[in-house]
Structures are given as structure tokens and as C-alpha cells.
Image (spheres, rainbow, N blue to C red):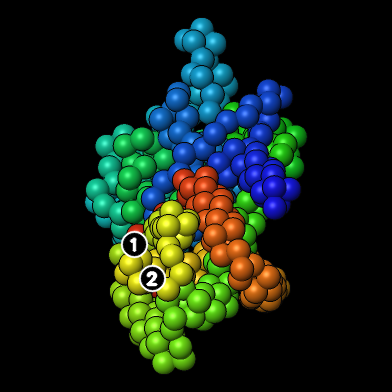
Amino acid sequence: MERIVWFILFIIMMIHCLDGGCPRATFEFFNNTIKTSYNFIDSSVGNIGSLETCPYTGRPYVYLPCYPNSSWGDEPYFSTCLKPPDNKELTTMLNILSSSLSSSIDHPYVNMSIEEVAKLPIDTFYDVSHVLSYLNQETMTLKSTSHTASVVNIIDHLISNNQNTNNEVYSNIYSIANKLLSSKSTLQMQQAQKSNRSIVKLLSSLETFSQNLKSNQSDQTFIEHNLAVSIVNMPNNRTKPIVLLITAFIAYFNQTALETALTPFTNIQFGWHELEVSVLFAIAGIEITLVYVILHFVTKKIHDEAILLFAYIILSIACSIGVIILPFSEVGSDKYLPVFLLFVGLDIFALPLIAVTTTSLFTQQTHNDQQGIGQGIQRFVINVATIIGPLFAGSLLKATWLMISFMFIIVLIATLLVTLVYPSFSLSNNDELSALIPPENKK
């Protein structure tokens, strides 16, 4: 048993040391390798990613998806984060920007709203030039998320459908993007993201735009001042799925072990027979049903990872009660019967919470194309637990305290694992999020 405990502790340390892709990765910025952490932000669209704000520009410059099925996109996007040059070292790009801005004084759309401009065909080069100069006015302000979404749609349309571009067009597009991603507009961008994935659309369009321009050697210098960032290393995020498989195994192991030991233990300890045990299992079934009903409403308000952590804390308390009370319980005495029933009640209360949330979270961590094999792996782990649990409990029926102590240890380990990975779970405020179906599958 000592070797098993040391092995499990070793697994915990290995999982804790794993670089799960988020929130840490290595990037190369202009031949300077920088390893940086990323800050999570809240979203109502499920699994998102992370944004890092540039200290010089005040706007996000790296988007990193945390999961294969991230709702913000499957690929990382990058923008510049450079310290502004001194006045004596102004670059050619700044000269281009200033010239383009100065040429945007007159345009035919001055009396039109942003939504009206977004509906225009914008087919010719002159249409493109006029629309960009309109959006690049210093007096242009984005007063609502619909304005933000409209501007993003315009940029995406221009990048996707117009090939006749020059330095003035380049400058205006990047200048408008800077305005959208400025610290003043970040909140509106996040709100617009909830309705039509505006941030992903903008960053994806800019990344594609920049990659296409890089094919022209004459544009290479210009692009290096905008989105020239190459990724060096972004490890896959396997930490949370592994933890969820371990916690599911421990939950079902604990459940089947308890079911196996309950009948002979109560017969020896309290002199119970078939009737008393049947009543206990019937009450347990009613409790489990009520927990599932309550869970249906709770998951609309509370995130699955919070419910999972709460459940394992309850399960740890239940097992601790058994470890503390069992040595003082005398055979044939009903003195600690209420405490025993409290232990069983807490254990049964926690297990449905763990069963549902581990399935939900594991589904969210698995790519849509791998849902089948992912669910197969999870079911295999659960089935192994339901086989080993009764064998374990049956072999220790005459050493009940040793059995409950081991169960307490592995439950504490599971609680520690959930606590370690809890901060890295992306938070979701979607009121329609159910316990079993992730947001991306609700379409």
C-alpha cells in the first residue's frame, strides 16, 4: 500500500509539472525567445483561450487557444508588441501611417452610420480607400458592440475579397485593427465576441492578411512591424483530461467499494438483515434522484469545475468521518449509527455530482472529431474502476478501517488534483450550459 501511495504522489507531481499549452507557451519575437504567462478572461461562449495585453500599446497581442475545441478558434493568433521608438528613430511604417491618415480627410460616407457602410458592396479600389479612410477618422468612435462587429465585418470583407492593395491600404487596415484592439475598446470587443466571434474573426483575418503579404519580399519589412511572430513551442494540453480520468476512476472505485462493503459491514456492526439494508439502498436511490434533479438547475448557475471541487470536498469530509469514528465503534452497538448514516449520506450526495461533472468537463476538453474515442477511453477507465472497487473491498472486509483509510487517501489525492487544475479551467457564464452537453454541441 505504501508503494501505491508513493506512486500516486509521483503521478500528481508529474501532472502538476506538465506544461499544458495554456496558460504558458514559448514564442519567438523578432529572434528573441520570450516565455510568458497568459491571463484568462471570462466569456459566455464556453472554452475560450487567453489574451496577453501588450504593456506598450495596451491591447492584446497574443491569442492562445487552451483546448482543441476552443470556442474562440483552434489556432493561435499574434499581433505586435513593440516598445514605441524614440522620436529620432521613427520607422518607415510610421511615416506611411501618418501619410495615410492625412489623406483620409474627404470621403463620400461622412454622413452615413457604420452599419450603413457595412452594407455597401465595397468592390472597387476607390470604395476600399474611402471606406478605410472613413473608419480611420480620429473622430470615429465605436459606441456599441454592434459598431464593433460591423467594423470587424468590413475588415474581414476587405481582406477576403480585395486583392488590389498598397501600403496605404495596409496602413489603414492595421490602424483600424489597433483602434479595435486598444485598451479602450477591449471590453466592447469581448462583448461583441459573445454574439459573432468578433475577436477571432478580426485576428484570424489579420493573420491571414499578413501571411499573404509575406509572400512579397518587398512587403516583408512592413509586415515585420505588424504581425511577424513565429511560434516556437506550444505543447498540447493533456493535464485536465488526465486529471478528469483519474477523478472519475476514484469516484466509481469508491462507489462500488462502498456498495460491496455496506451489506456485510452493517450485518456485523449493527446486526442488520435484508430489510434494513434494502431500506437503506432505497433511501440512497431517492437521494441520488433528488441530487440529479437539483443538479439540472444548479449547472445553469454554477460552473461544472466548481461543482466537481465541491463534490470532492464533501466526499473527503465523508471519508474522514469514517476514518475517525470507525476505530471507536464497537460491534453490536448502535451508538455511532447516526454518524455512519451521515457518512453514507454525504458519500451518496457527492458521487452523482462527480459522475456528471467529470463527463461534462471531459467532453469539453475533447475535440469534436475525437469525441467517440474520448468517451470510449473514459468508459474504459470507469469500467475498470467498477471491477477493481468490489475486488478491493471484498478482500478487506475484515480490515474495514484499512479499507476506508485507503479510500480517504485516494479521495484526498483526487481533491488535490482538482484543486491544482481548477484555476486553468476556462469559466463559462452561459446560462444554458447543461451538465452533459458542452456549448459547442448545442447547435
Q: Residue furthest bottom?
A: 275
Q: Is residue 442 visible?
A: no
| Residue 248 as seen in the image, left or right of residue 306 | right
Provide the secondary structure element on which disc 1 rests. Answer: loop
Q: Which mark is residue 333?
A: 2
Q: Residue furthest top?
A: 88
Instruction: Point out residue 432 in the picture as x, y percentages from the top left corner.
Output: 35, 72
Few, some or many residues within 10 Å of mark 1 (<14, 14–19, 20+): some
For the residue pair 322 and 305, the one nearer the viewer reads as 322
Instruction: Point out residue 216 in the picture as x, y percentages from the top left corner.
Output: 73, 39
| Residue 175 as seen in the image, left or right of residue 286 | right
Of the image marks 1 and 2, the number of the one nearer the N terminus: 1
Instruction: Point out residue 77 in the picture as x, y percentages from the top left corner.
Output: 58, 45
Please tell me whether mark 1 or mark 2 is closer to you in this view: 2
Few, some or many residues within 10 Å of mark 2 (<14, 14–19, 20+): few
> Quick check: 366 above or below 22?
below
> Quick check: 179 above or below 335?
above
Three-letter amino acid code of the residue under disc 2: Ser
Q: Residue at position x 51%, y 15% from top?
A: 85
Provide the secondary structure element on which disc 2 rests. Answer: loop
Real-space CA distance between mark 1 and mark 2, rounded to the nearest whole angstrom: 42 Å
For the residue pair 204 and 372, the one nearer the viewer reads as 372
Three-letter amino acid code of the residue under disc 1: Ile
Instruction: Point out residue 302 in the picture as x, y percentages from the top left corner.
Output: 34, 62
For the residue pair 224 and 342, the one nearer the viewer reads as 342
Q: Which residue is mark 1?
A: 302
For the residue pair 238 and 400, the one nearer the viewer reads as 400
Q: Is residue 131 visible?
A: yes
| Residue 37 as seen in the image, left or right of residue 231 | left
Q: Residue at position x 55%, y 41% from top?
A: 23
